[in-house]
Amino acid sequence: MINLKESFKESNYRDVGAHLWEHASATERKIIATVIVGIAALLPFMGFGLLDTPVSDYGAVLVYPVGMFVLMALGLNIVVGKSGLLDLGYVAFFAIGAYTMAILGTRTSLNTWEIMPIGIGLAMLAGLILGLPALRLRGDYLAIVTLGFGEIV
């Protein structure tokens, strides 16, 4: 069993968390991960304003687009920088998710956090539809196919 009293005597909580995770059994890790994922999945439906979309907070309105562009840059770094695949239609999948969220956000009463999994799912589905036929392509041919898909979207 994990000794929490001894672990929290240290001052660096990140190291404490890493220490607790390393010394936890596989069953304890599965339970902790399941509880965290469950709580995160239920947050949008709990009914309090913790996760409401900002309407008038100017700083928060600026943070969301910056966060999305950072995520896009990180993903593009993995695709182009690490694997060396030139994907010119990378932003098309982002656009599919964004259009889905915009349409559902304006025509339904769902909030952002309820719509987000749907947008992510449709973007993933579009990625599978394009990715499976283009799986064997490399170099210029992959760039042409992804550029064409980006132009279609």
Image (cartoon, helix red, strand yellow):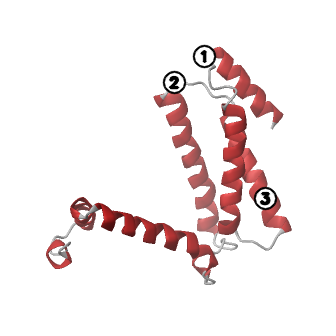
Question: Is residue 79 visible in this depiction of the protein?
Answer: yes
Q: Give the distance between the C-alpha atoms of the residues marked 1 and 2, in whole angstroms.
A: 9 Å
Q: Give the distance between the C-alpha atoms of the residues marked 1 and 3, in whole angstroms.
A: 34 Å
**Residue at image coords 60%, 67%:** 60
Residue underneath mark 2:
84
Q: Is residue 28 above or below residue 121?
A: below
Left-right relation of 67 to 3:
right
N-terminal label among 1 and 2: 2
Q: Name the amino acid type tagged 2.
A: Gly
Q: Which quarter of the rendered picture does the N terminus lie within?
A: bottom left
Q: Furthest-top residue in view?
A: 140
Residue underneath mark 3:
102
Q: How many marks?
A: 3
Q: Name the amino acid type tagged 3.
A: Ala
Q: Residues within 10 Å of mark 3 (few under 14, many from 20)?
A: some
Left-right relation of 9 to 134:
left
The percent position of residue 39, horizontal first and vertical second, equals: 50, 73
| In front: label 1 or label 3 | 1
The percent position of residue 135, horizontal first and vertical second, equals: 63, 26
Q: Secondary structure at mark 2?
A: loop
N-terminal label among 2 and 3: 2
Q: Furthest-right residue in view?
A: 107
**Residue at image coords 75%, 33%:** 150
Question: Is residue 91 visible in this depiction of the protein?
Answer: no
**Residue at image coords 55%, 48%:** 71
Residue underneath mark 1:
139
Residue placed most toward the observer, 71 or 64: 71
Q: Which quarter of the rendered picture does the C terminus lie within?
A: top right
